[in-house]
Image: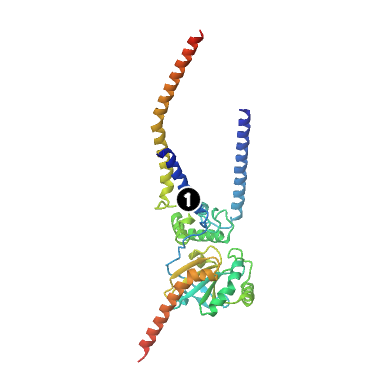
């Protein structure tokens, strides 16, 4: 006959050990993104290289886009740039949301020309996956997206809705597990829409 | 006893030193961010209160008043902007929650997963109290019995020695 005085604390202890053991493998930085399944927040921002060109949410309609939040000052971004370039050569549409750390709106120290120069140098060296770069001057759009740092990558569908929000670098493992299935599905939908539109337009 | 008082004194003095240095340090941090011009004293107070209760999403256990991370800078600027636009305390909190989740506010809401933080300590207290309550009379009863037996034995021995 087993004594309950012995069994109850033992069971409680095992439960506690199991709970704490799980804690060893949890990532305290992992949080659910608030931007997921929501449309891209409205923005109106200049092109990084050509500030007279202003982009709005229209740049995401009817196209599957990967929005990469980056900056030349960010070390991990430099690591992922070659892989992003590889993906862009396979036909993935990358748009950059660029922001600069030293271009502080409160105490501006860096000129735009200097930032552009650095970006050109970096992309020449490591590859340029971007169709164009949106310049998040005051980092307002990054804040609206719940961005905490760089790099972060968003998958935006044809309707301009954010479907994946990845924090950290984009590497082959992340692409295969987190992006590729949904991306391929969205691309299949897109080509289907395209062919139906074509057949409709034929007399 | 003397040893105990001495170690107590050491603990208290170390604690007060730490608190004092903490106060000095936080004062320093606050001094560096006094570059916002507030429209009113009320707005300044709101700003101070908000930057204390909003948590920096990048640096885990710092509020945005204490953190020097860029995201904390940006959030402070946003808080200032929102206050200047006439938003109140709760509206600013909601704005940040919409973007960074419940994590960003130091007071978590009570929901299905956080309710356990309230239930567990109270249930431990209740169960512990119940066990103590159930056990006590039994123990004191046997104690009395043993004591009485021992006393009787002692009396017997004393009786013999006489």
The percent coordinates of residue A77 (x first, y second) are 59, 69
B75 displayed left or right of A122: left
Residue under the image location 63 percent in, 28 percent down: B2
The answer to whether one can see residue A160 in this image is yes
- For residue A108, which quarter of the picture? bottom right
The percent coordinates of residue A100 (x first, y second) are 59, 68
- For residue B134, which quarter of the picture? top left
Coloring basis for residues: rainbow
Across the whole image, how many numbered discs are drawn on residues? 1
Mark 1, residue position: A18
**Residue sticking out furthest to the bottom:** A203
Residue under the image location 54 percent in, 76 percent down: A87
The answer to whether one can see residue B46 in this image is no
* Of residues A192 and A4, the one drawn nearer to the viewer in this rendering: A4
Chain bearing tag 1 is A
Mark 1 Cα within 10 Å, few/some/many (few <14, many 20+)?
A: few
B135 displayed left or right of A46: left
**Residue sticking out furthest to the top:** B162
Q: Secondary structure at mark 1?
A: helix
> Is residue B130 shown above or below A99?
above
> Is residue B64 shown above or below A156?
above
The percent coordinates of residue A189 (x first, y second) are 40, 78
The percent coordinates of residue A74 (x first, y second) are 60, 67
* Of residues B105 and A68, the one drawn nearer to the viewer in this rendering: A68
> Is residue B111 shown above or below A156?
above
> Is residue A13 shown above or below A31?
above
Q: Quadrant of the N terminus of chain B?
A: top right
* Of residues B144 and B106, the one drawn nearer to the viewer in this rendering: B144
Residue under the image location 43 percent in, 75 percent down: A186
């Amino acid at each position: 006959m087993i004594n309950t005085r012995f069994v109850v604390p033992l069971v409680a202890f095992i439960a506690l050990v199991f709970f704490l053991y799980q804690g060893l493998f949890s990532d305290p930085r992992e949080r659910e993104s608030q931007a997921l399944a929501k449309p891209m927040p409205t923005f109106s921002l200049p092109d990084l290289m050509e500030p007279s060109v202003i982009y709005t949410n229209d740049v995401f309609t009817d196209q599957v886009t990967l929005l990469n939040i980056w900056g030349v000052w960010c070390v991990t971004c430099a690591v992922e740039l070659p892989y992003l370039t590889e993906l862009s050569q396979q036909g993935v549409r990358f748009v950059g949301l660029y922001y600069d750390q030293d271009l502080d709106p409160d105490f501006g120290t860096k000129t735009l020309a200097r930032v552009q120069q650095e970006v050109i140098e970096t992309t020449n060296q490591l590859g340029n996956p971007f169709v164009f770069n949106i310049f998040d001057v005051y980092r307002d759009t990054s804040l609206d997206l719940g961005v905490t740092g760089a790099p972060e990558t968003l998958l935006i569908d044809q309707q301009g809705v954010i479907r994946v929000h990845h924090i950290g670098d984009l590497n082959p493992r992340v692409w295969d597990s987190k992006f590729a299935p949904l991306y391929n599905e969205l691309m299949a939908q897109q080509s289907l829409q395209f062919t139906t539109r074509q057949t409709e337009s034929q007399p | 006893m003397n040893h105990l008082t001495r170690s107590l004194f050491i603990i208290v003095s170390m604690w007060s030193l730490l608190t004092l240095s903490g106060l000095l340090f936080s004062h320093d941090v606050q001094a560096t961010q006094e570059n916002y011009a507030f429209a009113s004293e009320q707005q300044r107070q709101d700003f101070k209160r908000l930057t204390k209760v909003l948590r920096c999403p990048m640096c885990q256990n710092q509020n945005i008043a204490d953190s020097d991370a860029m995201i904390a800078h940006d959030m402070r600027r946003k808080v200032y902007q929102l206050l200047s636009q006439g938003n109140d305390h709760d509206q600013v909190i909601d704005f940040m929650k919409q973007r960074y989740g419940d994590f960003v506010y130091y007071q978590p809401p009570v929901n299905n997963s956080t309710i356990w933080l309230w239930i567990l300590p109270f249930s431990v207290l209740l169960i512990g109290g119940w066990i103590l309550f159930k056990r006590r009379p039994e123990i004191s009863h046997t104690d009395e019995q043993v004591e009485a037996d021992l006393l009787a034995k002692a009396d017997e021995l004393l009786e013999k020695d006489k």
